[in-house]
């Protein structure tokens, strides 16, 4: 995609097509320049019907394709992603604004999902119970669930779609992807490469748009499963509507991740980890550390460390500048929303010690790193997901008090403790109210082989994304009991099994 203002296409029945009957489009922007780079159709119910029909038609043939052949497509896909690695990262930077290093890290995480998918033949095997009763063998097998749907957010345009379709299709399902309308270009490129890897027609489909398209997918009678990643309000809605329409749903929502710094922590290492967690990807990660809880005497030196670290960071434009360490947020509107928290924090009694509005943004959507001290749990800044480069600092007297702060939090994605005490780490790990825990790790985001175990309002559903839970989500089990009779003499068979 190089030409400006070009409206992106959907991918259905192995063809790139215009959205049906859709005149309306939204802008895809380059956050570094503040300029439009493409247009995304808002999509129609007809688009959804066509994509689901395409996925349904391909289902039987693909599900019957041996698992090793399906996995072979993933091996070829893996090679193509490696070959196109840098281009994928640059496209990501262009439509999203993250730095080149962050974009490469994202492509790497997506690639690891494909590597995980290459190993699904070894994971999908069922269980066997020979002689579970006299003369009877039991077994379980995993079957595809059917047409699966993925609805993805703007903040990981490459990795989050890769959380979904490589696993779903290797398990024998067919797929309809609906990427964020703010960043459709990476998803398009990923599908192009998958086609080059040899995926058959109809196995993967792509539609664009927002609420109308999502609603049609959630209600479509031929859709079996929905994977969603996005904000909590929409995640809950998708879960409720999807379940009400009989779908299997895994729905990951927003977050408010706490980083607890104990007085015995290695301060230099902790400051580096905190800054990377809070300001990396301009704070637009569901695993970003957004609240530092400074325990006991550590607070003032932590703030000093963060201030001097932030002052040395190369904050700037990312497209065309690989040295930048922190880039812009997704849109001007989002930048203003994040900046608004600095005003409200000051008026509610907190102290803005580093103000990110003091950067020269030009036409970009840049907002510098911000640190707000003396935040308390009654403030909107603590209660709400900010999703920008703004770190709140809450002061606590003890680990127990820090754990209480976590208990009050409605979200439950990640949390980390910084300490040199094994005892403190163990207490934290056992009792903190979040599903993904780090010990001296700033962003405890699991890699492909581990589940993404958000809790509370950060996840709706049962089986999480990634790891073996991902394989379980995209398969359903069948149990079989088998009994074979001797051709003439059945007298040795247990009468319990021979009674009817
Ligand atoms: P979003 O909820 O605005 O959008 C996500 C998807 O939902 C998009 O595809 C969008 O088109 C669609 N959508 C938006 N409004 C809708 C509506 N009213 N009805 C139906 N569909 C709708 O999220 P975003 O702003 O794109 O992404 C950022 C959010 O995603 C943050 O809250 C972040 O924490 C969350 N996130 C969570 C995880 C996780 O694993 N928990 C990972 C990444 C991002």
Image (cartoon, grey):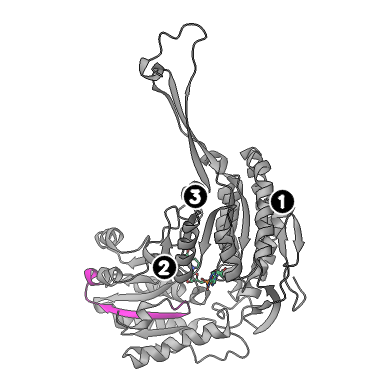
Task: Tell whether 16 sits left or right of 43.
Answer: right
Q: Residue furthest top?
A: 488
N-terminal label among 1 and 2: 1
The reply to whether residue 381 is visible in this rendering is yes
Q: Are marks 2 and 3 in contact (CB under 8 Å)?
A: no
Q: Farthest residue in the front direction?
A: 500
- Crowding at dot 1, Cα within 10 Å, few <14 / some 14-19 / many 20+, comes out as some
Q: Position of residue 441 (x, y in %)?
A: 40, 64
Verify whether residue 391 appears in magenta.
yes
Which callout, 1 or 3, points at the residue further toward the start of the chain? 1
Return the x and y of residue 181 as percentages of the image width and height.
62, 72
Residue closer to the observer: 146 or 359: 146
Mark 2 surroundings: few (<14), some (14-19) or many (≥20) residues within 10 A: many
Q: Secondary structure at mark 1?
A: loop
Q: Secondary structure at mark 3?
A: helix
Looking at the image, which residue is at 68% across and 63% down? Answer: 47
Q: For numbered disc 2, what is the local secondary structure? A: loop
Question: Does residue 439 appear anywhere in the picture?
Answer: no
Q: Is mark 3 within 8 Å of ligand 1?
A: no
Residue that label 3 marks: 473
User: Position of 15 compared to 361: left or right?
Assistant: right
Residue carrying label 1 = 197
> Who comes first in sequence, dot 2 or dot 3?
2
Res 378 → quadrant: bottom left
For the C terminus, the quadrant is top left
Which residue is denoted by mark 2 in the rendering?
Answer: 442
Locate residue 420, reporting x and y percent: 30, 64
Question: Mark 1 against mark 3, which lies toward the viewer?
Answer: 3
Whether ligand 1 has any atom under 8 Å from the Cβ at mark 2 is answered as no
What is the span of residues highlighted in magenta in the rendered image? 386-401
């Amino acid at each position: 995609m190089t030409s400006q203002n070009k409206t992106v296409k959907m991918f259905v029945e192995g063809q790139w097509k215009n959205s049906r009957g859709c005149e309306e489009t939204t802008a895809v922007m380059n956050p570094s320049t503040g300029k439009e780079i493409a247009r995304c159709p808002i999509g129609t119910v007809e688009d959804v019907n066509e994509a689901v029909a395409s996925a349904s038609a391909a289902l039987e043939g693909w599900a019957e394709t041996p698992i090793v052949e399906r996995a072979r497509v993933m091996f070829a896909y893996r090679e193509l992603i490696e070959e196109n690695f840098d281009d994928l990262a640059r496209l990501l930077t262009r439509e999203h604004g993250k730095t080149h290093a962050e974009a490469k890290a994202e492509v790497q995480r997506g690639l690891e999902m494909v590597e995980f998918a290459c190993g699904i033949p070894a994971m999908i095997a069922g269980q066997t119970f020979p002689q579970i009763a006299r003369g009877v063998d039991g077994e379980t097998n995993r079957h595809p669930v059917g047409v699966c749907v993925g609805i993805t957010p703007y903040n990981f345009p490459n990795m989050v779609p890769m959380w979904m379709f490589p696993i779903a299709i290797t398990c024998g399902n067919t797929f309809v992807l609906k990427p964020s309308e703010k960043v459709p270009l990476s998803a398009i490129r990923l599908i192009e490469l998958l086609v080059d890897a040899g995926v058959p027609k109809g196995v993967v489909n792509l539609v664009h748009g927002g609420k109308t398209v999502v609603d049609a997918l959630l209600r479509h009678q031929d859709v079996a499963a929905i994977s969603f990643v996005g904000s909590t309000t929409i995640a809950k809605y998708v879960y409720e509507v999807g379940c009400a329409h009989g779908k299997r749903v895994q729905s990951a929502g927003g977050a408010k991740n706490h980083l607890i710094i104990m007085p015995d922590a290695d301060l230099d290492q902790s400051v580096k980890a905190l800054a990377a967690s809070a300001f990396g990807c301009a704070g637009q990660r569901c695993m970003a550390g957004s609240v530092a809880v400074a325990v006991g005497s550590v607070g003032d030196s932590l703030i000093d460390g963060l201030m001097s670290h932030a002052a040395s960071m190369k904050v700037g434009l990312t497209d065309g500048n690989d040295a930048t360490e922190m880039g812009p947020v997704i849109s001007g509107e989002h930048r203003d929303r994040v900046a608004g928290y600095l005003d409200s924090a000051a008026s509610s009694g907190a102290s803005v010690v580093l103000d990110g509005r003091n950067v020269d943004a030009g036409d970009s959507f840049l907002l510098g790193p911000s640190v707000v001290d003396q935040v308390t749990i009654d403030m909107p800044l603590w209660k709400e997901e900010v999703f920008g480069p703004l770190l709140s600092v809450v002061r606590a007297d003890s680990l127990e008090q820090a754990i209480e702060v976590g208990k009050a939090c409605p979200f439950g994605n990640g949390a980390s403790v910084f300490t040199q005490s094994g005892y403190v780490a163990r207490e934290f790990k056992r009792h903190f109210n979040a599903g993904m825990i780090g010990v001296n790790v700033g962003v405890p985001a699991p890699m492909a082989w581990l589940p993404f175990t958000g809790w509370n309002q950060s996840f709706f559903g049962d089986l999480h994304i990634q790891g073996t839970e991902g394989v379980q989500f995209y398969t359903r089990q069948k149990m079989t009991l088998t009994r074979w009779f001797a051709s003439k003499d059945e007298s040795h068979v247990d009468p319990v099994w021979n009674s009817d």
